[in-house]
């Protein structure tokens, strides 16, 4: 009977509409009865397996019916409670199997894609934390060694690397910087006092000029004095321009050129301290026993000693070169500025206005008169 039903079912053509439902066909009572008999007489679906790939499919295509039922309940499909045999508008259990697999595959992919960024972020955070820990560890060890070396040098217990010629030049530079700072302080004070004097001369000249107009009997005397004070004020402003240029050049030499060289000197002294600290550490390890535990430490200490020795020598060369160029630059700048200061002051107190103006032109000094009013917009046009 089963063979007749299968042959009959194989020879029939069933039309399927767009929704997967069977099209409206004339009811065939004999076919429906044969299918019912097959389902009744066939094996229990709850205790057997379903081959999704048909006859001859591989073993991994076998799906347990119980797992299908659990998956259907998990995804809550609307047709989970329908009969396996199906109805006219129902769906077969075989058509639901790939849908369940697709749902599970999509959910697993979503879960995997959501978990990957989290794990990647955790690994990156751990990597950054490890790098910071290594940096702090190296900084702590270096600080400890340098502090130990510095204390040993202060108490006369440790040895230090000495370059007598270079250290003499460094001390000379520091002493020169202190003296130039004193010159700069006095020049600024002179500028301030002289500016006050020029302002007083200007006010006095204006007062004389006003009195010359209001006192006819003393008009000539007040006029002479007013012209004299105005001339002195003008020459004073010219001298102020020269002194301000002198102060600006000394300030650049002291607070920029010399300070830059001293900054390199500080780096050199720090490198010297580190070099001596690692040199002392290497000497102490060499004096101890040599075994499987100390040999790696000696090799590491030798590498660190070589590294800091190269740094120390490189900075020593930099300091030597900068000291040489600083000395040349200092001589050139001070020769020009001292000559300007001397000629300007001499011409001012000698009353030689032309020589004073010529001195400023010779050194390309532009005089900025603070008392001069800004030209009107008509004059600017």
Image: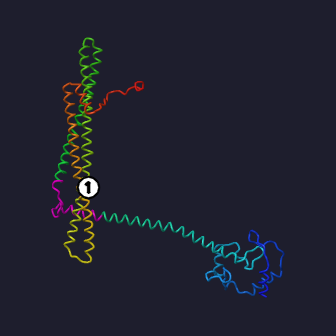
Is residue 148 one of those drawn in magenta? yes
Image quadrant in which the C terminus is located = top left
Residue 177: in sight, yes or no?
no
Q: Is residue 163 above or below residue 43?
A: above
**Range shown magenta:** 140-166
What residue appears at the point 73 percent right and 86 percent down from the top-left corner? 42
Q: Position of residue 33 (x, y in %)?
A: 81, 83
Is residue 231 one of those drawn in magenta? no
How packed is label 1: few (under 14 Cα within 10 Å), some, or many (20 or more)? some
Q: Main secondary structure of the magenta part?
A: helix
Q: Is residue 357 above or below residue 227?
A: below
Image quadrant in which the N terminus is located = bottom right
Q: Position of residue 94 (x, y in %)?
A: 70, 78
Q: Position of residue 374 (x, y in %)?
A: 37, 28
What residue appears at the point 68 percent right and 72 percent down from the top-left corner? 77
Quick check: 118 left or right of 31?
A: left
């Amino acid at each position: 009977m089963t063979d007749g039903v299968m042959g009959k079912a194989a020879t029939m053509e069933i039309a399927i509409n767009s929704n997967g439902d069977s099209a409206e066909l004339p009811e065939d009572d004999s076919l429906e009865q044969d299918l019912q008999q097959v389902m009744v007489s066939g094996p229990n679906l709850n205790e057997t397996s379903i081959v999704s790939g048909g006859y001859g499919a591989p073993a991994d295509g076998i799906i347990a019916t119980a797992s299908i039922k659990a998956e259907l309940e998990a995804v809550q499909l609307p047709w989970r409670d329908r009969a396996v045999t199906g109805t006219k508008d129902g769906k077969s259990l075989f058509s639901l199997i790939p849908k369940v697999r697709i749902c599970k595959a999509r959910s697993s992919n979503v879960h995997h894609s959501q978990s990957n960024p989290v794990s990647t972020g955790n690994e990156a955070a751990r990597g950054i934390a490890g790098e910071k820990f290594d940096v702090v560890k190296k900084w702590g060890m270096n600080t400890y060694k340098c502090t130990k070396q510095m204390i040993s040098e202060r108490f006369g217990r440790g040895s230090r690397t000495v370059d007598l010629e270079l250290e003499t030049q460094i001390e000379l530079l520091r002493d020169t910087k202190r003296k130039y700072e004193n010159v700069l302080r006095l020049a600024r004070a002179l500028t301030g006092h002289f500016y006050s004097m020029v302002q007083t001369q200007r006010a006095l000249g204006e007062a004389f000029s006003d009195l010359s107009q209001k006192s006819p009997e003393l008009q000539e005397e007040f006029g002479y004095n007013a012209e004299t004070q105005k001339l002195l004020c003008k020459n004073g402003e010219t001298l102020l321009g020269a002194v301000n240029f002198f102060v600006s050049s000394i300030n650049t030499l002291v607070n920029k050129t010399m300070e830059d060289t001293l900054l390199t000197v500080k780096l050199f002294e720090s490198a010297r301290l580190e070099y001596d600290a690692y040199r002392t550490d290497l000497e102490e390890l060499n004096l101890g026993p040599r075994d499987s535990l100390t040999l790696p430490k000696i090799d590491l200490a030798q590498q660190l000693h070589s590294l800091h020795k190269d740094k120390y020598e490189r900075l020593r060369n930099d300091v030597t070169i900068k000291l040489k160029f600083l000395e040349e630059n200092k001589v050139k700048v001070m020769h020009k500025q001292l000559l300007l200061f001397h000629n300007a002051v001499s011409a001012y107190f000698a009353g030689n206005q032309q020589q004073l103006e010529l001195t400023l032109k010779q050194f390309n000094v532009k005089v900025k008169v603070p008392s001069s009013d800004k030209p009107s917009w008509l004059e600017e046009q």
